[in-house]
Image (cartoon, helix red, strand yellow):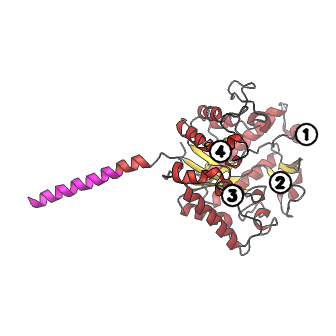
Amino acid sequence: MCKVYVRKILMLVSFSLWFCNHLYAQKILPKPEMRAVWIATIDNIDWPPSAGLSTEDQKSSFVRLLDFHQKIGINTLIVQIRPAADAFYPSPYEPWSQFLTGKQGIAPSPFYDPLEFMITETHKRGMEFHAWMNPYRAVSHLRNASISKDHITRKHPEWFITYGEKKYFDPGNPYAQEFVLDVVSDVVKRYRVDAIHFDDYFYPYPIPGKVFPDYHSFLKYGKGRKRDDWRRSNVDSIIFRLYRTIKVANKDCQFGISPFGVWRNQDKDPRGSTTQAGPTNYDFLYADILLWLQKGWIDYVTPQLYWEIGHPAAEYQLLVDWWSRNSFGKNCYIGLGLYKAGSNAAWKDKTQLPRQILKIRETPNINGMAFFSSKSLEKNLNGWSDSLRTNYFREPASPPKIP
């Protein structure tokens, strides 16, 4: 009789403990939420601190950066591994980046694979690693760029267009598209990246008074279409083919795009937002984000909403609502311009970021956020990194899965 009584007591205690733990978990663990940070390598904006550091200094500086972000609650790193047709890994297609070693084409010494190292360290901490690649920028500064003899602009100069102080792949050249596909496929096959991430640079932002000089490829490949429609079809084509290439190489690898924050102004299209943005994705960068979402050619979108609440031409809350209505069932994360802290009266207001985060969390179909960029968080601008650590990201959350 005593043994039965003791057994019942133990069962009751066990159940009580399970039930309390269950309630505790339900109470404190938030739903999956993207909490990402962009780590820009071009011009050594975020990492490495400077070009040409020793292997050990590169590794230790990345580990410090990673530990810092883990401490404040970040769960995803978006690391730029291909800033300008160059590589932060041993690539069969492109030379080592000058932003890593100081001179393009020169490998780290002692040799190591920075991409493999970064992925391993990131996954070790339970965080995701999204490989950020710029699709079409080939030379970032014509006057002072280090260009190696085996850079693709030297091998195939006919694939490239000079516009302003930069050199770009011609998006209308099918050979250039094939090259980009090969580069991406190689990374997805060889590395355990959780996503391939493209930013907002497709056709370049317009330079006042200068036309993007792609007339030769337009005459060759335009096939009677209007030039704007032909340009959009070029970008549509590579997005569709990239999605298919990534999924063939690794079906679990995501494909995400971080576009400029305005798809199209409503005065151009009733589906657009009630904004007065100068450049827009559709009309200036020839990136039809809505089509890609609707067709399922991308897994997530991270619009760069770097404007403040109350901005007269592109109001933050209005745009969050617009993207919520136009995410087509895909994960939508909001890109936040933390670097603007202190730049004007609105960004000097310490409640600006908390209000933006609140808007994200109360809006349906919005699944998290990404901060530009790492350096802004490290500087603890307006004390916002402390706020993330002690308040908004106090409890851990995992990144959302592909719907």
* Residue 3 among those drawn in magenta: yes
The answer to which quarter of the image holds residue 283 is top right
Q: Quadrant of the N terminus?
A: bottom left
Q: Which residue is identified by label 1?
A: 210
Closest to the observer, 78 or 353 = 353
User: What residue type is disc 3 on?
Assistant: Asp
- Answer with mark 2 or mark 4, whichever residue precedes in sequence: 2
Point out which mark residue 336 bears: 4
Badge 4 marks a residue whose secondary structure is: strand
| In this picture, residue 92 sits left or right of residue 123 | right
Q: Which residue is identified by label 2?
A: 140
User: What residue type is disc 1 on?
Assistant: Lys
Closest to the observer, 71 or 186 = 71
Badge 1 marks a residue whose secondary structure is: loop
User: What residue type is disc 2 on?
Assistant: Ser
Q: Are marks 2 and 1 in contact (CB under 8 Å)?
A: no
